Amino acid sequence: MTQGPQFNYVTANRFYVEIDSEIAASFSECAGLGITLQVQPLVEGGVNDQQRFLLDAPKFSNVTLKRGVTDSLDFWNWLQKILDNETNQRRNVSILLFSQAGETMQCWTLIGAVPIGWKADALQARSEAVALEELTLAYEGLKIEGNNSGSGFAQQSQGRDTSSGYFAGKS
């Protein structure tokens, strides 16, 4: 009896964020990962039963990360450097999704990411909920890797040029 492909599904509740190959934080929510390709219809004379199209450049949606407020000011300091007009603040930011066994199952790397927004939730003295901070990132490219070897997140860092913020010629 032939069996179909085996898929290892993961829960979406255990992930960390790595900036320039170092774990920077654990977040409770990540939203906005996505790419959209726009198409330009092309009319070809005499071809009435088909449509041709050209692909435009991809558009990467902004990613929003949320976490509980901590005593770390790393993300605010990164944004402050941009506010102070310091150049070369783009970073590779990897979002690492872990399985229940603690292995990296998927890694989304935002290439050339830069913070474009930061905000804190309303602070209420009577609330028992954790205060959250939110970081929004724009990025120039996206690389997605799975982990078939089960070796953890260290494998995901290979091939990254930390001086330029881009991946080397790794395919």
Image (tube, grey):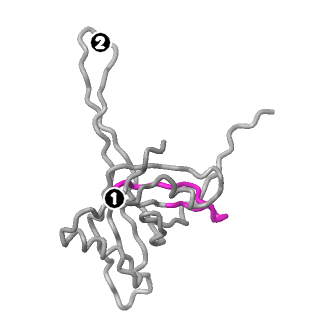
Q: Main secondary structure of the magenta part?
A: strand
Tell me the kind of residue under disc 2: Asn
Q: Residues within 10 Å of mark 1 (few under 14, many from 20)?
A: many
Nearer to the camera, 93 or 106: 93
- Seen from this angle, which residue lies furthest left? 85
Q: Residue at x 41, y 82 (%)?
A: 70
Q: Is residue 151 magenta?
A: no
Is 144 located above or below residue 15 in the figure? above
Nearer to the camera, 135 or 50: 135
Question: Which mark is nearer the camera, 1 or 2?
Answer: 1
Numbered tag placed on residue 48 in the rendering: 2
Residue 36, image quadrant: top left
Where residue 1 appears, as percent x and y from the top left, is 81, 33
Q: Which residue is mark 1?
A: 113
Nearer to the camera, 150 or 54: 150
Q: Is residue 100 magenta?
A: yes
Cα distance in 3D space between marks 1 and 2:
44 Å
Residue 116, image quadrant: bottom left
Task: Give the structural element (helix, strand or loop) at label 2.
Answer: loop
Q: Residue at x 22, y 68 (%)?
A: 86
The number of numbered badges drawn on the structure is 2
Tell me the kind of residue under disc 1: Ala
1 or 2: tag closer to the N-terminus: 2
Magenta range: 96-112
Q: Residue at x 30, y 71 (%)?
A: 78
- Seen from this angle, which residue lies furthest bottom? 125
Nearer to the camera, 142 or 46: 142
Is 57 located above or below residue 47 in the figure? below
